Amino acid sequence: MAAQPSSADVSREIRVVFGRLQRRLREIADADDLTSPQAAALSTLRKHGPASASELADREGVRPQSIATIVAGLEQRGLVRRDPDPDDGRRLIVSLTDDGQGRADGTISARAEWLTGAVEERYDDAERRTLAEALALLDRLSHA
């Protein structure tokens, strides 16, 4: 009989599996001409709305200099715009353009389609039920 896995073993496996899945989902998003940081910034702006460069840098966990480069690349592609902050004219607010919103929506759709197809192809009904049960447990962990 196999030994029960320790909490440390389970914790490590969760991190490894989620890291792999996250990288795979990023690959789906990066299939176009955007870098991973650019795709992440678009996604953050889609989720949280317009933000200053420093707020965006904080949300992305990068230095302000890095976010400036990311935003400049996105602006060059017409995916974001920078407008003066109505409350502080010295500050600029970064927001999605219509093309940027479409690209962010498309990235999310592509990821959802891939994941749905992968679950459908790789798991039978019983395994999908098991996954749903495991996800409920992981969700409970995420609210701890």
Image (cartoon, rainbow, N blue to C red):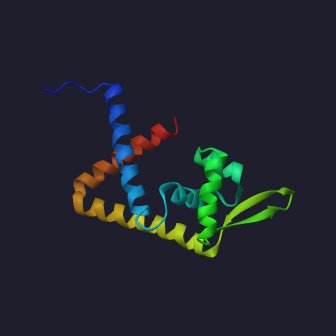
81 left or right of 42? right
Residue 100 placement: quadrant: bottom right
Query: Residue 73 at what x, y percent from top left?
Result: 59, 63
Query: Residue 20 at what x, y percent from top left?
Result: 35, 47
Residue 63 placement: quadrant: top right
67 left or right of 13? right
> Quadrant location of the N terminus?
top left
Q: Residue at x 28, y 48 (%)?
A: 130
Q: Nearer the viewer, residue 83 or 43?
A: 83
| Residue closest to the far left | 1
Query: Residue 7 at what x, y percent from top left?
Result: 35, 26
| Rendered view: 93 above or below 10 | below
Query: Residue 18 at what x, y percent from top left?
Result: 38, 44
Count of residue discs: 0
Residue 76 placement: quadrant: bottom right
Q: Nearer the viewer, residue 98 or 121?
A: 98
5 left or right of 79? left
Q: Residue at x 48, y 70 (%)?
A: 106
Q: Residue at x 38, y 47 (%)?
A: 135
| Rendered view: 50 above or below 77 | above
Q: Nearer the viewer, residue 55 or 38?
A: 38
